[in-house]
Image (tube, rainbow, N blue to C red):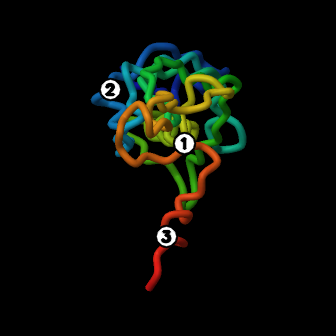
């Protein structure tokens, strides 16, 4: 269920919202093969009316399915935005559209989720990436001309007589 707040509920004091936003309602397209949103976002928000704007505070969590960009290991993570805060204006040129004195907060939640997505997901900060088997460095074992550690690839080219 989308986080929708009724301004009539905010006249005397703030109100609390909690629930989840489905994948269809989130509509987040990462365009990244190493990252996708794996489930609905959950939220716990406190909304107050402050100086003609909505002050929203709370926590947002989104499950992610990622591939480590170094070793391509599949990992699952929760993106948690703790102490999330947002100020939504009710007047002026940036005013939020009101429908029957209600405001849908989904666009602001979606925006901060997208801004918080990891750019380069890693399975571990110490991940060393893909490792090549030792046979790839040994000419004797494969019988092919491979490269050995410490040997420059330019060595054979330097021997050419042009």
Q: CA distance from mark 1 to mark 3?
A: 39 Å
Q: Which mark is residue 55?
A: none
Pick the residue in front: 111 or 77.
77
Q: CA distance from mark 2 to mark 3?
A: 55 Å
- Residue 30 falls left or right of residue 118: left
- Residue ranking furthest to the left: 24
Pick the residue in front: 139 or 80.
139
Viewport quadrant of the C terminus: bottom left
57 is higher (above) or lower (below) than 137: above
**Viewer can see residue 151:** yes
- Mark 2 or mark 3, which is nearer to you? 3
Provide the secondary structure element on which disc 2 rests.
Answer: helix
Viewport quadrant of the N terminus: top left
10 is higher (above) or lower (below) than 149: above
Q: Quickly name the residue at label 1.
A: 119
Which of the 4 quarters of the picture holds residue 3? top left
- Mark 2 or mark 1, which is nearer to you? 1
Q: Quickly name the residue at label 3.
A: 157
User: Looking at the picture, how far across and down is residue 41, in whole percent?
Assistant: 44, 21
User: Looking at the picture, how far across and down is residue 21, in whole percent?
Assistant: 39, 22
Dot 2 or dot 3: first in sequence order is: 2
Q: Which mark is residue 23?
A: 2
- Residue ranking furthest to the bottom: 162
Q: Residues within 10 Å of mark 2 (few under 14, many from 20)?
A: some
- Residue 7 falls left or right of residue 82: left
């Amino acid at each position: 269920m989308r986080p929708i707040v009724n301004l009539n509920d905010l006249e005397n004091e703030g109100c609390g919202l909690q629930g989840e936003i489905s994948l269809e309602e989130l509509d987040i397209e990462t365009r990244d093969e190493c990252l996708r949103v794996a489930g609905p976002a959950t939220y716990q928000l406190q909304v107050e009316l402050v100086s003609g704007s909505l002050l929203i505070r709370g926590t947002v969590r989104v499950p992610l399915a990622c591939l480590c960009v170094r070793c391509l290991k599949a990992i699952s993570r929760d993106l948690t935005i703790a102490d999330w805060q947002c100020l939504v204006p009710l007047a002026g040129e940036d005013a939020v559209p009101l429908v029957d004195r209600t405001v849908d907060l989904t666009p602001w939640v979606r925006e901060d989720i997208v801004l918080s997505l990891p750019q380069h997901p890693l399975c571990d900060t110490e991940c060393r990436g893909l490792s090549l088997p030792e046979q790839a460095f040994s000419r004797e074992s494969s019988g092919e001309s491979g490269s050995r550690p410490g040997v420059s690839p330019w060595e054979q080219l330097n021997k050419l007589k042009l």
